[in-house]
Amino acid sequence: MSKICEVCGLPEELCVCEEIAREVQTVKVYTVRRRFGKLMTIIEGIDEHDIDIKELTKTLKAKCACGGTSKNSQIELQGDHKVKVKEVLSDMGFSSDTIEIRESKKNNKRRR
Ligand SMILES: [Zn+2]
């Protein structure tokens, strides 16, 4: 028995809604420094209605070999995984043009 997609009315195995949604998401990836100086990678802009964010978090955690959680349409990964995240999302069908990596200003190192 297969589920029917509420958006397009096709059985889930034929539905491409999520694939289409991935191409049009504008995803922001950046790092923040949390308490005790821990770096977290934040992935923002995932539409939970279109994308299975729990599944995506699981995939990212596995590919980056790190811990993480998702809440409020935001994924948090432990450590700095900006480049890897973009790679993984691109592989999953997210358009790399819409994945924006932001460098956090506070982390700029001074040149000597
Ligand atoms: Zn559909």
Image: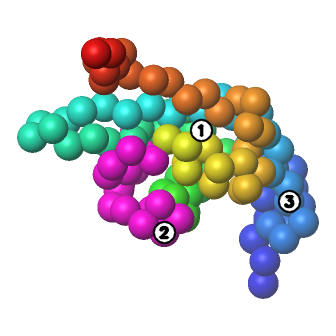
Q: Residue furthest left?
A: 36
Q: Which three-letter amino acid code belongs to the residue tagged 3?
A: Cys
Instruction: Classify mark 2: residues with Cα within 10 Å, few (<14), some (14-19) or many (20+).
Output: few
Residue 57 falls left or right of residue 3? left
Residue kind at label 1, given as amino acid type:
Asp
Label 1 lies in ligand 1 vicinity (Cβ under 8 Å)? no
Please tell me which of labels 2 and 3 falls first in the chain. Answer: 3
- The quarter of the picture where residue 12 lies is bottom right
| Residue occupying the point 78% across, 84% down | 1
Q: Is residue 90 or residue 83 the one in the foreground?
A: 83
Q: What span is colored magenta in the figure?
A: 61-81
Closer to the eye: label 2 or 1:
2
Asked if residue 45 lies in the magenta stretch, the reply is no
Image quadrant in which the C terminus is located: top left
Task: Residue lying at the far bottom in this picture: please name it.
Answer: 1
First reached walking from the N terminus: tag 2 or tag 1: 1
Q: Where does residue 103 sit, x and y in percent of width and height? A: 45, 23
Compare residues 59 and 13 and report the one nearer the observer: 59
Q: CA distance from mark 2 to mark 1?
A: 21 Å
Query: Hey, which residue is sitting farthest front in the picture?
Result: 112
Separation of disc 2 and disc 3 at Cα? 26 Å
User: Image point 84% across, 71% down: which residue?
Assistant: 13
Q: Which residue is mark 3?
A: 15
Question: Which residue is under mark 1?
Answer: 47
Mark 3 residue's CB less than 8 Å from ligand 1: yes
